[in-house]
Image: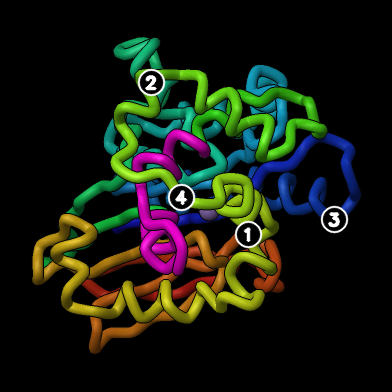
């Protein structure tokens, strides 16, 4: 059995009572998965944006998620915990590289491939699809670079996109990796920093394009997937299952526009959306 959870966005402690409750529920959910669904072994896929490092001090953010880390690392050996990075916790990839074998999550990656019930599944967060859906700029390299720097920006909420871009621009090694630079840099990067509601459901309506990209058979080319794989993603916070196009979105942990605690179970090759409580 595979249990998938996406876009929990663990929040800063005592920021507000709603997010505090969400985080508490998530801890109870993890313990329940450990004692029930995965008590006989299986896979737990964290599908990105478990924690939000953007414009927060990542060291403090990691300390605040100590309860979640301790549950995630307490699963028995027959449960594999896969950490697929999202845009908000992209820096986990770098932490894993730095600590290598000592890192608590054995598998940290941009995507994970698993088989269940004789079917093949491809798990990825989905920011890659948003980059493709952006009408102005489609460089995944620059987006990932931006996401990594936002994870490192610290607590400085005044760290505007333009300031961040100055930092990126002064790094020759980063610039050499970019193939093309957008004509209006500030606008391009400011649009990436908008909240999900504006980015995905605002004037560009990126969410619709993202879903269409996810359903297209051409995704084999732009996602690096095999043609017979079932795509599981998150990021838009909008859950759906489309058996015909072999694609599903997990939704989010009560984060807008979701209004409850969504997760997903894959059993005997069947993708089943689920709600905690
Ligand atoms: Mn995301």
Which mark lies nearer to you, 1 or 4?
4
Q: Mark 3 packing: few (<14 Cα in 10 Å), some, or many (20+)?
A: few
Point 62% across, 56% down: residue = 191
The residue singled out by tag 2 in the image is 96
Of callouts 3 and 4, the N-terminal one: 3
- Mark pair 3, 1: CA separation: 12 Å
Image position of 51 with respect to 64: above or below: below
The residue singled out by tag 1 in the image is 253
- Mark pair 1, 4: CA separation: 34 Å
Is the magenta region chiefly helix, strand or loop?
A: helix
Point 55% across, 46% down: residue = 185
- Mark pair 1, 2: CA separation: 25 Å
Residue range highlighted in magenta: 127-146
Horizontally, is 109 left or right of 67 in the view? left
Image position of 144 with respect to 227: above or below: above
Q: Mark 2 packing: few (<14 Cα in 10 Å), some, or many (20+)?
A: some
Q: For the residue labelled by badge 1, is the local secondary structure a helix, a strand or a loop?
A: loop
Of callouts 1 and 4, the N-terminal one: 4
- Asked whether disc 1 touches disc 4, contact meaning CB atoms under 8 Å apart, the reply is no
Can residue 143 be seen at all in this image of the molecule? yes
Q: For the residue labelled by badge 4, is the local secondary structure a helix, a strand or a loop?
A: loop
Q: For the residue labelled by badge 2, is the local secondary structure a helix, a strand or a loop?
A: helix
Q: x, y percentage for residue 64?
A: 72, 26
Image position of 212 with respect to 54: above or below: below
Which mark lies nearer to you, 4 or 2?
4
Horizontally, is 237 left or right of 115 in the view? right
Q: Based on the picture, tell me whether residue 97 belongs to the magenta stretch.
A: no
Which mark lies nearer to you, 3 or 4?
4
Q: x, y percentage for residue 218?
A: 17, 73
Determine if the C-beta at disc 3 is less than 8 A from ligand 1: no
Residue 182's label in the rendered image is 4
Image position of 175 with respect to 38: above or below: above
């Amino acid at each position: 059995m595979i249990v998938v959870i996406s876009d929990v966005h663990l929040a800063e402690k005592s920021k507000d009572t709603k997010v505090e409750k969400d985080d508490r529920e998530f801890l109870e959910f993890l313990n329940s998965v450990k004692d029930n669904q995965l008590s006989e072994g299986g896979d737990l896929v964290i599908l990105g944006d478990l924690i939000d490092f953007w414009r927060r001090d990542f060291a403090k953010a990691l300390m605040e998620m100590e309860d979640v880390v301790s549950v995630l690392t307490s699963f028995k050996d027959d449960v594999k915990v896969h950490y697929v990075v999202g845009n908000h916790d992209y820096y986990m990839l770098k932490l894993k590289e730095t600590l290598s074998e000592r890192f608590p999550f054995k598998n940290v990656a941009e995507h994970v491939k698993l088989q269940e019930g004789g079917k093949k599944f491809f798990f990825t967060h989905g920011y890659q699809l948003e980059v493709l859906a952006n009408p102005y700029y489609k460089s995944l390299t620059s987006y990932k670079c931006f996401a990594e720097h936002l994870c490192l920006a610290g607590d400085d909420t005044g760290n505007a996109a333009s300031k961040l871009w100055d930092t990126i621009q002064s790094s020759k090694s980063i610039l050499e990796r970019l193939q093309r630079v957008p004509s209006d840099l500030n606008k391009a990067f400011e649009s990436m920093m908008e909240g999900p509601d504006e980015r995905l459901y605002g004037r560009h309506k990126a969410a619709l394009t993202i879903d269409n990209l996810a359903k297209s058979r051409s995704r084999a080319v732009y996602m690096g997937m095999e043609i017979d794989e079932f795509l599981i993603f998150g990021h838009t916070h909008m859950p759906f299952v489309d058996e015909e196009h072999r694609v599903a979105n997990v939704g989010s942990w009560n984060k807008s526009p979701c209004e409850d605690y969504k997760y997903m179970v894959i059993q005997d090759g069947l993708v089943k959306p689920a709600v905690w409580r």
